[in-house]
Each structure stands twice: as C-alpha cells, then as structure tokens.
Image (cartoon, helix red, strand yellow):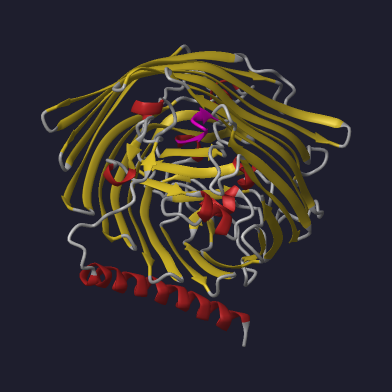
C-alpha cells in the first residue's frame, strides 16, 4: 500500500470520526434521563483578570489542561498550539527555531502572550519566543480570543494566550511532596530530561520547582542551498512557584527562566547562531479586607535577550527588560437575586532595550514608560451575565488610548449558553518600528481595533460539549513595512484590515474507553486597503483527535490536522500550499507511577512550510519514560 493511500485512509478515518462525533452528540443528549444536567465547573482567570466560571464566559475561551498536554504527541509548545481552532503558529524551522503564535487571523504582534499573567514579549520585535517555553514547565494554558485591551492594555487585539506554569499544592496521592522525572530520546536525533517536585509543607506553603534540558542535532532548516548544515538546538530551563494562605490573604511568587542556543541558516558572513535568555516572573500579595472585598498588589519583571553571532564574530543584540507594578481591588455584593462584582486598579511598567542593530548602531530611544487605570463591572442575575470594562493607557511615546468592552451570556436551558461581546483594542508600535536605525518611523500611531463576537456553548451531558463562535475584527492604522527603495524598508500606518471567521469545536466521550474532539476554523483575513489576503493567514483549518484506552495499561491516540494554503506577501503572489499532518501516540503504564510513551509526529513525512523559505520537521519519533513519586 502506498504512502498516499495510507494518508488518504487516515484522513478519511479522521473525517469519519468527526462526523461520528457530530452525529452522536445530540443522541447522547436525547438518551440522558437526568432531569438536571450537572457539569463540573471550571474557573479561568485570564479573560477578566480574576476568577470566573468558564461556562458563563462572555467571550471565547479555550483551556488546555495538564492531562491534555501530557497525552499530546507534541514535543514543544508550537506543536501543541497548532491543533486548536483559531490558533496560527509560524516557525522558521524545527525545534528551537524562531516561532510565533497569533489568534483569529491577526498578526503575532497583535496577540498578547503571558506567562503567569506577565508580559513575555520582545519590545523590539513585538512577538514572544514560544519555543523558549518548555512543555515540562506548563500546568495549563488559557486562550481568551477576541479583543481584551480593556483588561490588559496594548497588543491584545486578537486575544490572549496565558501560559500558567506548575504552581504546586496538595498532592493527589496524599503525600507531603510529589513529582515526576521524565527522560526521552528523539529522531531526528535529540534528547531531553525534565523533573519537577511540588507539594504543601506542614505549615501550609505550596511550592513547585522544576527544570528541564532539551537538545537536538537538528536538520537543515532552509530551502536555500547556500548553507547546507544541521541546525541544532540546546535549551535549559527552570521554573518555580511559592504561595501561602494566611488569615488576612495570600503571598505568592512564581517565575520561569530559559536559556538556549539555536543554530540557523544565513549567508556568510551573517550570524548563524543565537544565544537566548528569557525570563518572566512576579511576586504578589492578596489582602482580604472581608469575605467580599480583596485587594492585590504585584511586582512583575520579564527579560527577552538574543545575541547573534558566527564563530567568534558577534552580530546584532536585542535585549528587552520590562518591570512593572499592578494593583487592583475587587468588591462583590448582592442585591436581591443579583450578584455584582466591581474591580478597579492601576498598572504601570517600563520597557527598555539594549544592544545594537545589524548596522552596529544603538536605538535612538531605549526606554518608555506606560501607565494605565482601569475599571470593570460584572452583573449576574439568575441565567444572565454581563461583563463590562473601561481602561485608559498612557504611553510616553505616542500619548493615550482608551479601550472598553461589553459582553453578555444567557443560559436558555441548563447547559445551553449563548454569548455576545464587543471590544475595542490597540497595539503600541515596537521599538523596531519606531527607532530601528535607518528604518524606524517615530511618527507611527498605535493600531486600533474593534471586535464583535456571537457564540453558543452547548453541554447536553457531561460527555458532550459543542462550542460555536462567529466573529469579526476591524483594524485601522495597521502598520506595514513597505520597500521605499531597493533594500530599504520603512513602516507606516497605511492599512486597514477586516477579519471575519467562524469556529466550531466538538468534544464527546463515547464511553469509558473512547473519546474524541473535532474542530473547524474558517476565516476571511482581508487587507481592506489593498484587497488582498493578510500574509501567513490561512482561510481554513480542520482537526480531529481520538483517544482510546485499549486496556488498563495501554492508551492510544491519533490526531489529524489539515491547514489550508496561505499567501506569504502583501500582494498575494507567493503561496504556501495546504498540508495535512497525522500524529500517533501510545503510552503504557507499568504501574501507577511508571509510564512509557511513544509519539510519532507527522507520520507520513509531509513536506510543508509555515514560513516561506523554511522547512518544517518531517517525521519525528519521540520515546520517553516517566516515573512519578
């Protein structure tokens, strides 16, 4: 049987599984004899910057839990995120290569990535190095789609990806301390080892400490023939978290640090290696004035540093340091059947850059201060929830920006919730866009956006969930880099964009052994100024996944993702073709503490690119052993 026939068979199987999920979901609801549907309540912190119920959210939120991460065939964060509806991932090669993520057809600079609620992006590029965030450190990921500048300020036009590291706490096995050690080998040849320990001390301190080492020999990333070599990657990371509850409130701190060396291809004598350092952390306190009133104070810091070189010759340096303060107070009160939550606060941080450009020249301006004041009000009355927010940001480079949002959700019957929302947003120009030597434009204005969404979440039983969302995002003053003369590019506010899309995700547990998930993502990412598609944004993506517990010890899984074609330039003359990847995985539990896992990504060795001129990995094998204690 040929590889093409096998691939077609697997794709057909996945499509059939998705259709079966759709056909069985209503049946499960009809067969249920429960008078009232009881669903486990999941709380999230990202959309409103406070704890709220996921089921009653007024915007689209996806939660990727610890078990999902552990079961996935993905070996790194970019591979994990690319399977979810509304999420676009672009990589310049394989493991450790420069990677970026965006939501709902916006650019990576218009998507805010947080680590434990702390901004982790580069102030020069405006993107976040998601390859520097190891999966071994992550406890869960919250993806809040749509405009959220009223809560978080600049850059949250497409949405927010909040990566939450392991926080510790009471162990499920009842021990005072618990943890996991994992070691694995990969092909193309590489390996990794990770470990974490966490728990709760006798005096009530929750703690977590983890670390990982990851390295690959790599492969030739680019499609060019001027530098044929294997582009390897090495990374070490450390994550920590401490917290303690008191009678008066809570003290807490957490952080993630990663250091790596990446190899890439450039024509000599340009640099072809990079040393990177990334850190995001905070220390905070919550004071409970009463059962219904609390205040929070946090000090935050993040670092994004890259030094490029070839041999002993150093190239450009990009170094971002960000530190700030966040303070808020929250009051909850009730009137008859209604519940009210009022939140107010301030936020301020300084961004500074150090180093030099490829020309060896420093930036004309190397720091800027940002300050904001915000307020939120939420109203809950029986089956109705309303969320509102208003925020004013002041940036000492371009002045002020006011953003706001309003959203509502309504539960028609138990388990069936409709939602709608409207939000404005903005993105601050980066230091590269403003001050890059010979190419920056200090007169740039911030990008501005308006986002609309209507959605429906249906959970007819504990075994079935269906989420639908229709959205539109309008962006003006979009910054575009245009070639003003040969080899000279300048940014300007000349573009308007409109992105319209539809997302649907269906999950179903057939029985105790078999479960699945299917999603589709349809969008029209249009540059309204030129009439062309926005570069690197697909129009269609579909994914399906099945998990089967074959025996008490053996678990199997399969996932297929189809990603449509994408244009790579402003005038849509160059296109990356569509591609389909299939991943398989199997895990065998020797006992309650020991597990062997085999994962194969891109089983049929599909040759594809997510960034023009760069190859994505082919077939990848990953064999690991984990021991819990």
Q: Is residue 273 left or right of residue 536?
A: right
Q: Is residue 595 left or right of residue 48?
A: right
Q: Residue furthest bottom?
A: 1
Q: Residue furthest left?
A: 336
Q: Residue 247, relative to residue 221: is it above or below? A: above
Would residue 378 be visible to someone looking at this image?
yes
Would residue 122 be visible to someone looking at this image?
no
Q: Percent x, y for residue 506?
A: 35, 62
Closest to the observer: 475 or 459? 459
Count the numbered circles shown. 0
**Residue at the (17%, 61%) spot, across then down:** 35
Closest to the observer: 71 or 402? 71
Q: Main secondary structure of the magenta part?
A: strand
Question: Which of the 4 image quarters holds residue 627?
Answer: bottom right
The residue segment tinted magenta is 111-119
Closest to the observer: 192 or 340? 340
Quarter of the picture containing the N terminus is bottom right
**Residue at the (49%, 30%) spot, across then down:** 117
**Residue at the (80%, 51%) spot, across then down:** 227
Q: Percent x, y for residue 334?
A: 18, 26
Q: Percent x, y for residue 84?
A: 45, 54
Q: Is residue 116 left or right of residue 42?
A: right
Q: Is residue 295 magenta?
A: no
Q: Residue 563, relative to residue 510: is it above or below? A: above
Q: Is residue 117 magenta?
A: yes
Q: Is residue 214 left or right of residue 110?
A: right
Question: Which of the 4 image quarters holds residue 54?
Answer: top left
Q: Percent x, y for residue 358?
A: 72, 28
């Amino acid at each position: 049987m040929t590889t093409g026939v096998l691939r077609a068979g697997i794709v057909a199987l996945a499509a059939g599984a998705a259709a079966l999920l759709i056909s069985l979901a209503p049946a499960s609801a009809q067969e249920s004899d429960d008078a009232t549907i009881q669903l486990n309540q999941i709380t999230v912190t990202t959309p409103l910057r406070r704890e709220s119920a996921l089921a009653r959210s007024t915007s689209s939120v996806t939660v990727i839990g610890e078990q999902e991460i552990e079961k996935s065939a993905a070996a790194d964060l970019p591979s994990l995120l690319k399977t979810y509806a509304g999420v676009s991932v672009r990589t310049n090669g394989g493991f450790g290569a420069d990677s970026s993520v965006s939501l709902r057809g916006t650019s990576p600079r218009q998507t805010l990535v947080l680590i434990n609620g702390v901004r982790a992006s580069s102030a020069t590029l405006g993107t976040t190095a998601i390859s520097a965030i190891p999966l071994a450190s992550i406890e869960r990921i919250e993806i809040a789609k749509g405009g959220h500048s009223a809560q978080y300020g600049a850059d949250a036009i497409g949405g927010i990806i909040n990566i939450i590291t392991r926080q510790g706490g009471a162990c499920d096995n009842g021990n005072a301390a618990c943890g996991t050690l994992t070691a694995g080998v990969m092909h193309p040849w590489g390996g990794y080892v990770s470990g974490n320990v966490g728990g709760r001390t006798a005096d009530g301190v929750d703690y977590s400490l983890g670390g990982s080492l990851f390295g690959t020999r790599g492969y030739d990333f680019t499609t060019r023939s001027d530098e044929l070599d294997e582009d390897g990657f090495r990374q070490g990371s450390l994550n920590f978290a401490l917290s303690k509850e008191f009678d008066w409130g809570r003290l807490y701190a957490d952080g993630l640090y990663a250091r790596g060396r990446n190899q890439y291809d450039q024509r000599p004598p340009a640099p072809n290696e990079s040393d990177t350092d990334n850190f995001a952390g905070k220390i905070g306190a919550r004071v409970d004035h009463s059962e219904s009133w609390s205040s929070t104070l946090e000090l935050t810091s993040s670092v994004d540093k890259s030094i490029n070189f070839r041999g002993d010759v150093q190239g450009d340096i990009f170094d971002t340091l960000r530190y700030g303060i966040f303070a808020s107070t929250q009051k909850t009160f009730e009137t008859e059947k209604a519940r009210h939550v009022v939140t107010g606060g301030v936020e301020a941080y300084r961004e500074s850059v150090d180093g030099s450009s490829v020309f060896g020249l420093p930036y004309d301006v190397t720091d800027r201060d940002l300050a904001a004041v915000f307020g939120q009000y939420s109203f809950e009355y029986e089956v109705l929830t309303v969320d509102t927010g208003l925020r004013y940001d002041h940036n000492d480079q371009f002045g002020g920006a006011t953003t706001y949002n309003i959203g509502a959700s309504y539960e028609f019957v138990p388990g069936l919730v409709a939602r709608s929302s409207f939000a404005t947003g903005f993105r601050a120009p980066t230091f590269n866009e403003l001050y890059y030597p010979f190419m920056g434009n200090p007169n740039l204005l911030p990008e501005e956006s308006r986002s609309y969404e209507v959605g429906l979440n249906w959970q007819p039983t504990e075994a079935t969930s269906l989420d639908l969302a229709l959205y539109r995002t309008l962006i003006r003053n979009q910054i575009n880099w245009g070639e003003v003369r040969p080899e000279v590019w300048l940014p300007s506010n000349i573009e308007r964009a409109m992105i319209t899309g539809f997302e649907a995700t269906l999950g179903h547990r057939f029985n105790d052994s078999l479960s699945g998930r299917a999603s589709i993502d349809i969008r029209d990412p249009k540059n309204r100024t030129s009439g062309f598609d926005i570069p690197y944004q697909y129009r269609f993506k579909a994914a399906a996944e099945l998990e089967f517990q074959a025996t008490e010890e053996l678990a199997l899984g399969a996932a297929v993702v189809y990603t449509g074609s994408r244009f790579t330039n402003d005038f849509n003359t160059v296109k990356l073709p569509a591609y389909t990847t299939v991943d398989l995985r199997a895990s065998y539990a020797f006992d309650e503490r020991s597990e062997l896992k085999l994962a194969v990504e891109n089983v049929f060795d599909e040759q594809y690119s997510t960034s023009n001129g760069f190859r994505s990995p082919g077939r990848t094998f990953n064999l690991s052993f984990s021991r819990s204690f």
